Amino acid sequence: MQSVADSARSVTPSLWRDSDFRSLWAGQTASQLGEHTSLVMLPLLAVLTLDVGAGELGVLRAVGQAPLLLLTLFVGVWVDKWRTRTVMVLADLGRAVALGAAAVAALLGGLGLPVLLAIAFAVGALSVFFDVAYQASLPRLVRREQLVRGNSAVEASRSAAQVGGPALGGAMASLLPAPIAAASSALFFAVSFASIARIRHRESISPGSGGAQRIWRRIHQGLRFVAGDTSLRTICLASAAFQFFLAATMTTYLLFLPRALHLSGTAIGLALAATGPGALIGSLLAARLPSRLGYGPVLVAAAAVGDGVMLFVPALHGGSMATVSALIAINVLFGAFGQLVNVTVMAVRQAVTPDTLQGRVSATITFAGMGLTPVGSLFGGFLTQHWGMRTALLCTAAGMMLSPVLMALSPLARLGRALPAPDTVRVGAARGELGHYRSGVHIRFDVPADPAYPGRVAAALSSVRLRTFGYIGAVLVAAGVIGLAVVRVAGWGERASSLYTAMVVGGLLSMLYSPWVRFNARRRSSGYAVEGSYDITDDNIMMRSGSESGGIAWEGVTRVVNTPEFWILYVGRMPATVIPRRFMSAEDAETLQAFMAEHGLLDS
């Protein structure tokens, strides 16, 4: 990746002189405050007004969180197709209307659990839209060298909302009548709407057609972009590891404080609240440290210190003032260094991602990280139940150290004091600007009579068709191995062990099915060696093999998968044919690749 060199003669203007950034910051602050207020206010309204039980409350919280898993990847596609300002103002307007409807329902005596469930889902879904959009809007709004300071300001206000929002929401639900409480929360979104509507910056967006196939293709492009970039891939894996073990740690941590340390509710609240001021400190540090010490060293060191301090928690005993003070210090450090990592990672991620993919990349990393949170919570509960609180807390806190290890072993650790820039070839492919192809594409080349060539074609087509078997097999093997380990620890008997052994064996067979089919395809087709040719225009692909010929129109091609030897063309969801690159000239290959990229067909 290239580095963005800072010009010694140019002076970066202050972000706070930019009226558009001020509008974004103010609107995002109000929106985050409204979001975190409503996260507490709606469940408390259900408890205090409707007297719901624990099961119903759990359903209400799950419904509010469900959009994060159900919609995030789709929202990333839509945010890349629309102007982020439009997405944010519509999300604010929708949440204000939803909470206003709750206020009217409460005023008329019709605020029941079904209404609250619908409102919680609507607010949660629109919050996903807003959160993905505001993260994608910043790199479109400010200069690259301002990303860290911009993220620092935005994330500082989000941290303040995370601290003050729940307290404010609890106070409103407890002290105010239900209609006024709901209407008060809606005011935050109205303020955000008014502020963000003042942004005058006009974004350039890439047009894209709707349709289910095109949406899935664009989601796949976001996934492939993250997987294909070493920095983004590392960020995604480190985020997933951190969120998984953090969820496991917090499950044990919230049991450890009252039951092992015998702390009061006030002491627990004081200790947990210390992460808020720590996060504000981290946001301030993030504005200066990376540009002075280097992005890589700051990322690795901050992650190691922030995650490492949690290893001291299992060593605490008793509920004395010294223990509470130690917990406060640990949480301040955890919040400060964790926020330093968050802001720095977000700046790096925004810097290496083209504007046309900001929404999809943000959504992909959020989905990968937050998607493992429920599994991590279950894992933490399982370890606590079978190994005890201290041992489980030590194991899960140690697991969090996997995140800095992943970053230390990747190119992220070697980043200097300048933000990296997107890879120009990959950005060009993402925007459909790779190369300059000549108008009226006409490419013709011959395929010699090679006995090995038909086998390679058959193997390439069968590999993409049967790739799902490999994925399913890998999942079965992983689940079986984990199950066998759990059975051995828990002593659940031979019956369960046989089940997981069968899963491992079945998974291995599924993984071997695709290589076996490819081997047979090569063996059976090796005798079909005839001369052929390709005649490619901007309308269709004509192919001749021996005395037979056929063709495919470009308008019927839904996507093209890039492999080392072939371009594999899909019609619908199935691979239809291949275009071999090694028989083309370098100029023709570049022209055809640019043509497919501009038409949004090329996956990688």
Image (cartoon, helix red, strand yellow):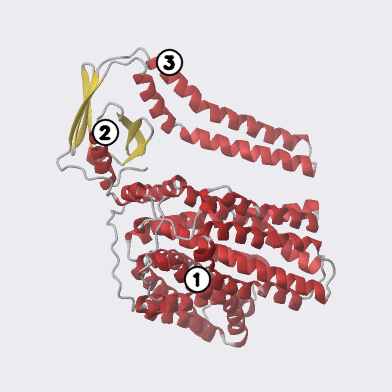
Q: Assign a secondary structure to mark 3.
A: helix
302 or 82: nearer the viewer: 302
Q: Position of residue 338 (x, y in %)?
A: 60, 64
The answer to which quarter of the image holds residue 150 is bottom left
Q: Furthest-front residue in view?
A: 9
Q: Which of marks 1 and 3 is in front?
A: 1
Residue designated by label 1: 152
Indicate which disc residue 19 carries.
Answer: none
- Residue 523, which numbered label? 3
Is residue 121 at least partly visible in the picture?
Answer: yes
Count of residue discs = 3
Sequence-wise, the earlier of marks 3 and 2 is 3
Q: Which amino acid does label 3 sit on?
A: Arg
Gap in angstroms between the C-alphas marked 1 and 3: 59 Å
Residue receiving disc 2: 586
Q: Which of marks 3 and 2 is in front?
A: 2
The image shows residue 554 at horizontal and vertical percentages of 23, 39
- In contact (CB < 8 Å): disc 1 and disc 3: no
Tell me the kind of residue under disc 1.
Answer: Ser
Q: Is residue 377 above or below residue 323?
A: above
Q: Which of marks 1 and 2 is nearer the N terminus?
A: 1
Quarter of the image for residue 80 reads bottom left
Locate residue 16: give its quadrant.
bottom left
The amino acid type found where label 2 is placed reads Ala
Mark 2 secondary-structure assignment: helix
Few, some or many C-alpha atoms within 10 Å of disc 2 (few <14, some 14-19, many ≥20)?
Answer: few
